[in-house]
Image (cartoon, grey):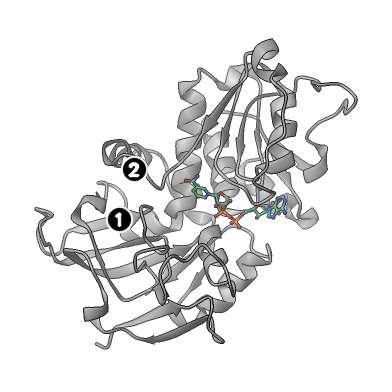
Amino acid sequence: MAERALFISPQAEIPAEVRALDLRELHGDVLIEVKYSSCNYKDAMVIQPGNRIARRDPLIGGVDLAGVIVDPGSSGRPVGASVIVHGYDLGVAHHGGFATAARVDSSWLVDLPVGMSLRQSMEIGTAGFTAFASLKALEHAGITPDDGELLVTGATGGVGSAAVVLGAAAGYQVVASSGKATASTYLGDLGAARIIGRDEISDLPQRVLGSTRYAGAIDCVGGATLSQILRSLNYGGCVAASGLTGGSNLETTVYPFIVRGVTLAGIDVVQMPMTKRQQLWNDLATTDLTALCAMATMTVNLDQLIEALSALHRSEITGRILVEL
Ligand SMILES: NC(=O)c1ccc[n+]([C@@H]2O[C@H](COP(=O)([O-])OP(=O)(O)OC[C@H]3O[C@@H](n4cnc5c(N)ncnc54)[C@H](OP(=O)(O)O)[C@@H]3O)[C@@H](O)[C@H]2O)c1
């Protein structure tokens, strides 16, 4: 079968197009037949004309993938082994998962956990994995559902939707913050106990600290939203911060930290060490994946991908987009 891929050239007149893939264009000792990928915020950014996220030209997009090994290289895995790859340079500086085939470095391979299918792994994808890592960071900071409500921002997006599902499953009263007025049924179905607007996170703007409202927060929005969260956490609270859809600048005072003992936990799954990465995927596979996978509300093929990524960039998507190769 002819191999195909979504090639991206941000500086070109046509910044993204699907065309035939010559396997000699790929680099890395392990060859994978890609079965699934997914659409993430970074994928939507990388097809924007003139963006500086793509670090090779042309670039095959796709920051995550799941598939089976065709050539194991030096990985020590057998031909046919099921693997997940996400992060590192994938889909940014190294050809990614929006292709029927991919080559990667053997050190990037996550073994598909027992109890999880390839399809499920990409229904969860980078976004779901990030939400899981965020929840674990709160657990690590000693936050429990008995401490109070869990705030999730960007709640209709990939990370946010997964955080609502995982938070509710862990027993939290989840407060979902969203800019989409029509999302309340969707968020309620995911398990949110309460839904608030993007602007309703904090109060007492004239004071350095707001009222204490939340025991913990999973934030993928950043910017002013993260500043407000820091002012609103209970004593000893923790926010797991992973994203910047609302902005990359963070204005804060030291008061949340020195008066309320608040923790700001940074979440990075791109360079996360492999031992922790594999362990978290294994842990995820022991949970009930039904609701988490159901958040993949849309499935697209390579030819439908550019339109899907554009809709994601316009913040029109609720839930996750699975890519079937
Ligand atoms: N640190 C890591 O390792 C890591 C891993 C994965 C993702 N991320 C980051 O996490 C963020 C979310 O990724 P994703 O894949 O979940 O993206 P996504 O599916 O596009 O969701 C982002 C959500 O953010 C909200 N949003 C969008 N524009 C906003 C704005 N201007 N102000 C406030 N909220 C806004 C929207 O939710 P509502 O409409 O519901 O408000 C949107 O659905 C991105 O910044 C991504 O780069 C980081």
Give the quarter of the figure containing the N terminus. Answer: bottom left
Residue 3: which disc? none
Can you tell which quarter of the image residue 35 is in?
Answer: bottom left
Label 1, on which residue? 84
Q: Is residue 200 left or right of residue 311?
A: right
Total labels: the figure holds: 2
| Local SS, label 2 | helix
Marks 2 and 1: in contact by CB < 8 Å? yes
> Residue 209 location in percent, x, y?
79, 20
Q: Is residue 27 above or below residue 134?
A: below
Residue at 42% from the left image edge and 78% from the top image edge: 6
- Mark 1 or mark 2: which comes first in sequence? 1
Give left or right: position of 8 versus 251: left
* Residue for badge 2: 281
Q: Is residue 222 above or below residue 125?
A: above
Q: Amino acid at mark 2?
A: Trp
Figure quadrant of the C terminus: bottom left
Q: Measure the C-alpha gap from mark 1 to mark 2.
A: 10 Å
Q: Secondary structure at mark 1?
A: strand
Q: Is residue 325 left or right of residue 235?
A: left
Name the amino acid, label 1: Ile
Label 1 neighbour load within 10 Å: few <14, some 14-19, many 20+: many
Residue at 37% across, 60% down: 90
- x 42%, y 60%: residue: 63
- Give residue 261's position: percent from left, percent from top: 62, 13
